[in-house]
Image (cartoon, helix red, strand yellow):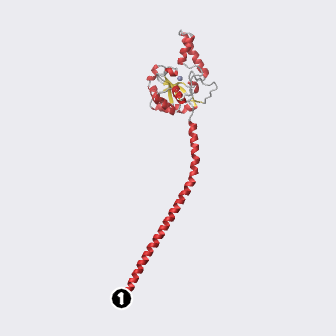
Amino acid sequence: MDKEKSQVKIKKGFRRVLSIILYISITAALGLYSFMLGEKLGREEGVSQFQIQFPDELEIFPDEEENTEEDEEEIILVNRDNPLPEDYEVTLYTLPDGVNRAAEEAYAPLCQMLAEGRKEGLNFEICSSYRDMQRQQELFDEDVEELMKAGFSYEEAYEEAARETMLPGCSEHSTGLAFDIVALSYQLLDAGQEKTAENIWLQEHCAEYGFILRYPKGKEEITSINYESWHFRYVGVEAAMYMTENGLTLEEYLSMEET
Ligand SMILES: [Zn+2]
């Protein structure tokens, strides 16, 4: 009986081991199957999401590229050799002083520049802004008359006046993009202007707002205009920064672009 009892025990133990092995095998097989199934489903979901999103992105990109191209505006050159066309049109905005006027694109940058300067304790006066061509003719004639009174011949007076005042149609002031800005405490358009705190600040910061000092010292041969520390011209931030950093006049900058 003892022998039989022990044989039964062995059989029972063997069955238990077998059932454990079987249990582990089935669990492992089920786990592997669900893992593989999950992988397959996951991959399929990924593909379908990718296909849904892609066409949306494709439609966005071309529009954005078109917009950046439209942003680039042409910079107009006005000087003795390049008069404004007689039918030149400009949209003007009256400045907060109620007197001066600025072209649409220069209005906000000008106001912003002067406001920033005021925060530094500076006080500006705009003594010349937009001028129509008729007013430019009057100014020029007045200059010639003055010089003739001082003893110049008409030809000499004409030549001299053209160095100081632009001929009608050749003045940047007729674009609404140019401004003569002086210190409130010193309003003379002479060599003393550049010594004012206002002028020093303007010359240092104007490019940040898209303005250039249009007739710089040492460039008289190129601009055909005597140095004017007070005459600022709007050209846009990118061009203004480039010209200022590289010491270029508008004439030089535009001829560089052509080549
Ligand atoms: Zn001017």
Q: Is residue 112 visible?
A: no
Q: Is mark 1 within 8 Å of ligand 1?
A: no
Task: Indicate the quadrant where residue 173 lies.
Answer: top right
The picture places residue 126, in percent across and down from the top left corner, at 52, 25
Residue pictured at 58% horizontal, 27% vertical: 175
Task: Say few, some or many: other residues with alpha carbon within 10 Å of mark 1 (under 14 / 14 to 19 / 20 or more).
Answer: few
Kind of residue at disc 1: Lys
Instruction: Return the residue nearer the eye: 118 or 8.
Output: 8
Screen quadrant of the N terminus: bottom left
Residue located beneath label 1 in the image: 3
**Along the line of sight, the residue nearer the viewer: 128 or 26:** 26
Please report the residue visible at 60 percent of the width from the left and 19 percent of the height from the top. 137
Residue displayed at 54% across by 60% down: 44
| Image coordinates for residue 64, horizontal then vertical, percent | 57, 43
Image coordinates for residue 134, horizontal then vertical, percent:
61, 21
61 or 95, which lies in front? 61
Q: Is residue 147 visible?
A: yes
Check the image and report above or below for 25 versus 156.
below
